[in-house]
Image: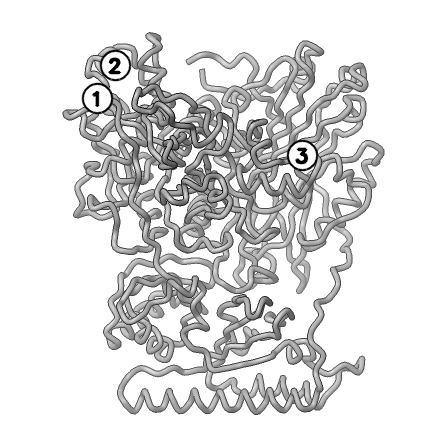
Amino acid sequence: MDNLTRPHILLPNAPESLQFTSKSARGSNPSYPERNRVPHGEWLQNRFEQIWQESVVISDDRRAASVPGRNGVYVEFAGQPGSPLKTQSLEDKKSGIRLLNIRKKEVDGELVNYATIFIPSEKRNVFLKKFRDYTLNDTPKGIPKNQDLAAGIEQMQRAILTSFWVDSDELMPGDFPVWCEIWLRIENSENVENLIESFFDVCTILGINYKRQQIGFPERLVTIIQTNHQRLGELIESFDYVAEIRRAQEPESFWTSQYNSEQTEWVEELLTRVNVIDGSKVFVTILDTGVNNGHPLLSPVLSEEDCHTVVPDWNKSDVLGHGTLMAGICSYGNLKKALESGTLVELISRLESLKILPNEGKNDPDLYGYLTSQGISLAEIQNPQAKRIICLAVTSPYQTDKGRPSSWSAAIDAISSGADDDQRRLFVISAGNIRNPQDLIKYYDSNRKISIESPAQAWNALTVGGYTRKSFAQEADYDGYKMLASPGTLSPFSTTSLTWELKKWPNKPDIILEGGNLLKSPKGEIENSDDLAELTTFHQPLRKHFSTLNGTSLATAKATWMASVIQFYYPNFWPETIRGLMVHSAEWTNELLAQFEINLSSKTDVARILRIAGYGVPDLKKALQCASNSLTLVAQNSIQPFIREGANYKTNEMHLYRLPWPLEELRNLGEVQVKLKITLSFFIEPGPGEIGWKDRYRYSSHGLRFDLNNTNETENDFKRRLNKAANTDEDEIIGGTSGSERWIIGKNNRKQGSLHSDTWIGNAADLAACNIIGVYPIIGWWRERHYLGCFNKQTRYTLIVSLEAPESEVDIYTTVRNMVAVPVEIQV
């Protein structure tokens, strides 16, 4: 392989670690409805007693009929439309009263908050006392006790199936059995085996079909059953540990375009120029329909021992062909270029095939998080020392409502973070395609409305959407046809996250790459063309060697290949770093900005393009190396976000980096415009479960943020500002001298998820004074659910900083390299 002439520079010195000393004030309290205290308090008591008696009668009747009954009561609370519900006060962990799920539904144009809880049979008086105290007793400040809790409750009822259903209403089972995910609450991690066996026993008694697959999360265990509406209702009446219910995920069948008729001689000629790099530890792991290693272009990099199936009875071959299509791009990057170049083609990675779909193209609904975990385990047992890039272009349209996690996406977050084994992994996942021709005709309005598919909402994954440069179809039959998308704009297939809840879920996709284009006939019909897709390997080489691939599958395969190249050149870079470099190198095309009328001076517009195209199109050359007029600094470090002091759990430390800045060169450039870009990449451990995603039930174990000192800000002032920010809830906007207006994306747009990147463009002389970066933690469930014992865990992160001056103006790379004298070790 070619040597990198200017590799990235690894910051050699550990950052300064600073302890936190102060806390800022919280935001304003939510406004609860005003109530007539005594009548409302009496209604709460009477209604609660009525619900309790109804539940006791039902449980007694079930036991009398020799069917399982509960040892507690499920209660659903509802708030007043448009008003909050004090959900954290509904739970009393010491009494065994547990908050199971929180939901929001629109009623007459206003959102209503719902919460479902479980109350043990012997703890009936806990809530009665809360309501009596509200009615009769005051706090020392003269406020009714439990006022916010009581005032927020508009209705309550005995919980029924809808109280546990957290998916779209139209997905709820009817009279015919369908596969559903059952999310069980875990009280004691040492008793999980007994809990799940008890659940299966109840299912057997009720005649409910189940699979023994299960996925574990903090305080949740997910399994899968096949049942109808009636039996689900009976299950709720029979078992104390149900927390929420969702429709099981069913990946869609794959779409591939028409194939090219290529000649066998091309393959034979190319093989004379192929060189598989000996000793490379980089493996690309493809979770798909299998990969046929009998294809002559794939057999050099895919051995029989590296082909696996998640179900032992399946054969390893790729009958459907999608996995083999992916493999050609993952291995060669651009197969057409390799065939035509006439030069040496070096393959820097080996392949692993994990077959997670059967030959019919669709499994029975399964816990795909479980299948994914099992597949990764098979590969890691076979090649434990591999530097692995995991490619997943299998997606499901279910369970991506407004970006909330699914069991599949949460499992990927758990696997990638090393939650169970402390081993981090990089997943490259397709955003999912627009498939319906009627939706494709409505390009690009459909792209704005159709959501990215599960599991691409995973926080730790590199999610890939599509754009296109394809603009020519040479077939004579296409006279009078028009390209659906213009060059440089969004691919017609690419889904977006514009429909997701803002300020709650990550911006997805993270990047976009070539996803192909489509044709529109004079009659307005949509048609495919091989010229608008990319050449790749076909799964039946005795019939033909080549076919074509498009959509976000193509984009994901290209991203996987790119990630494998970076990993090869930088063998000591972490998965967090590979992901960070790809995003760091990305930029939006001018055509894309024009297509969606994006004004980069508007933070609202920037937030919109992030939900459409992520950070843009990555540049492999920039991701791999620097230039004389540009440099990239990389820091890989660990931080302990939280600590225990006595009975309190608090934020622990922040890291401060003093950058080796080319001060003289920047000052000499004066008012010349330079570009600074900062990217922070880290992995979170997930805490899924539909419990509001706030307070102790945040999805992420922790969060990290970065900031840069402002032009006229002293180091001490900068430390004080970060100290305040780190002790403020992440939904708060921190004031002061942060200079947030100088950033293109802005603090409030970049803070979602576990991958943050932003760009500052300004005068070189001003930037010379801005050379201190702080990395600090914000609240997560590691701290808020400290009883789980994770409050003192460390987390890894990668900080990437690049500085770019106009070409030929100055050599800043050599200056900084000499200051640091430790360029990153690279593979030669």
- Packing grade of label 2 (10 A; few <14, some 14-19, many >=20) is some
Q: Nearer the viewer, residue 464 or 397?
A: 397
Q: Amino acid at mark 1?
A: Pro
The quadrant of the rendering that contains the C terminus is: top left
For image coordinates 45% across by 46% down, the residue present is 452
Q: Nearer the viewer, residue 346 or 654?
A: 346
Could you tell me if the residues under marks 1 and 2 are in contact, i.e. CB atoms within 8 Å?
A: yes
Q: Secondary structure at mark 1?
A: loop
Residue 790 screen position, x and y as percent: 54, 55
Q: Secondary structure at mark 3?
A: loop
| Residue 85 higher or lower than 587, as above or below | below
Label whose residue precedes the other's in the sequence (1 or 2):
2
- Packing grade of label 1 (10 A; few <14, some 14-19, many >=20) is some
For image coordinates 58% across by 37% down, the residue present is 596
Q: Amino acid at mark 2?
A: Leu
Residue 522 screen position, x and y as percent: 38, 31
| Residue 40 higher or lower than 482, as above or below | below
In the rendered image, the residue lying farthest to the top is 342
- Residue highlighted by disc 1: 296
| Quarter-of-image position of residue 152 | bottom right
Mark-to-mark CA distance, 1 and 2? 8 Å
- Residue highlighted by disc 2: 271
The answer to whether residue 280 is seen in the rendering is no
Say the numbered circle drawn on residue 600: 3
Left or right of 57: which side holds 328? left
Q: Nearer the viewer, residue 825 or 806?
A: 806
Q: Secondary structure at mark 2?
A: helix
